[in-house]
Image (cartoon, coloured by chain):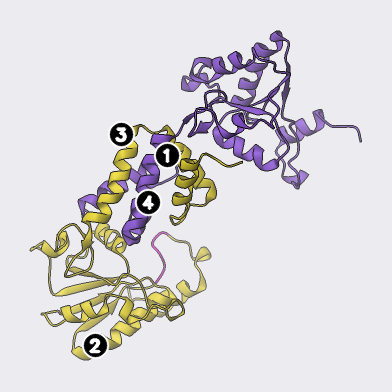
Chain colours: A yellow, B purple
Amino acid sequence: MNVARPLAQLIGELERLPGVGPKSAQRLAYHVLRMTVEDVQRLSDALCQAKELLKLCEACQNVSAEPLCEICRDARRDPHIICVVSEPRDIAALERVNEFKGHYHVLHGLLSPMDGVGPEQLKMRELIERLRGEIHEVILATNPTLEGDATALYLAKLIKPIGIKVTRLAHGMPVGAELDYADSATLMSALQYRREM
Amino acid sequence: MNVARPLAQLIGELERLPGVGPKSAQRLAYHVLRMTVEDVQRLSDALCQAKELLKLCEACQNVSAEPLCEICRDARRDPHIICVVSEPRDIAALERVNEFKGHYHVLHGLLSPMDGVGPEQLKMRELIERLRGEIHEVILATNPTLEGDATALYLAKLIKPIGIKVTRLAHGMPVGAELDYADSATLMSALQYRREM
């Protein structure tokens, strides 16, 4: 059976979103039909407005509605430390911890030669340019994955010669985890980087 | 940290969709920012158009862009058998089987007194009205759940006195399932409704 065309179209568009399979696209589409006209309009507007109004912060490349993002505009933050992350959402994760009070830099990806992502595809040039200012430390907070590690290594080799301290987030056991369930790579890191008490 | 307002708004709207938690709303929102303007526009239009153009079929209450849906307009289908389902998506599931060639009727829900869903909240009146025509059989294809069974029972009591044959989808072991993993209610049904070979 062919479902009605506007419905098929909506299902098709929803299916293109990440993590939305044919089944959930269908479920979402039928949900949209049950929503009020106002709610659908609000969702539709939010999509267009987000795309239209949001740009990248000129300094840190975070998503921002202003030329400079909220963090870069915040005078109380330490401009001498830059924490490098892969994605804008990583900033939100780190901000929730409320520990880091410096600035950020978003690479918008990780080095992945297999997928054709080299240094030019990432916001690395913009990062290096920022290092001309008075930067004391660059924290490499890319994910502890193969690509995250490779990207961190690449950046470290690039930045250390400038004479800036380069650090990396600690690897180890997640707080609250059980040794029994930890994968061996994590356990190995936890052993290698063990601290004296 | 507050994310940029248009982004927060989009995340908020996405979070209201079923099955979309805060985490996936965030992920979807950032994905939207990476989509092309045209793709976002198409998604946004599909939402509004689906809501605007789709109505319920005047006969079977299925979702349709026309006053009568594709199935109700199809002259090759048997108008004497009506298969009653809970949701429009159930029609798609049954049509995939390619076995049933009659008409459908969508209740848009199931009886659930706890949630305040009585017969008036469902498209039951519309179903009873259709039975005035020459209907030979009503197949009750609501889900084999507590509410689906209750709804089927209610309808059977309503329809049988009119003198129309009322049937229900067979309960039993799903094809390809293992006895070992079947729940006892299913096994009990499978035993009760066992067939001679």
Residue B65 % position (x, y): 48, 34
Q: Which residue has dot 2 on it? A: A160
Q: Which residue is mark 4?
A: B42
Q: Residue furthest top?
A: B161
Marks 3/2 in contact by CB < 8 Å: the verdict is no
Q: Residue at x 55, y 31 (%)?
A: B69
- Which residue is at a point 55% across and 33% down the rendered structure image? B88
| B122 to A87, vertically: above or below | above
Is there one chain holding both mark 3 and mark 2? yes
Q: Residues in magenta?
A: A172-176
Q: Which residue is mark 3?
A: A38
User: Mark 1 = which residue?
Assistant: B50
Could you say where residue A115 lies in the image, as x and y percent from the top left?
44, 76
Tell me if mark 4 has few (under 14), some (14-19) or many (20+) residues whose alpha carbon lies within 10 angstroms of its own.
Answer: some
Q: Main secondary structure of the magenta part?
A: loop
For marks 3 and 2 on the same chain, the one whose residue lies earlier in the sequence? 3
Are circles 1 and 3 on residues that touch, CB within 8 Å?
no
Image coordinates for residue A96, horizontal then vertical, percent? 26, 56
Give the Cα separation between the discs numbered 2 and 4: 46 Å
Q: Which mark is residue B145?
A: none
Question: Label 1, label 3: how many angstroms apart (C-alpha)?
Answer: 13 Å
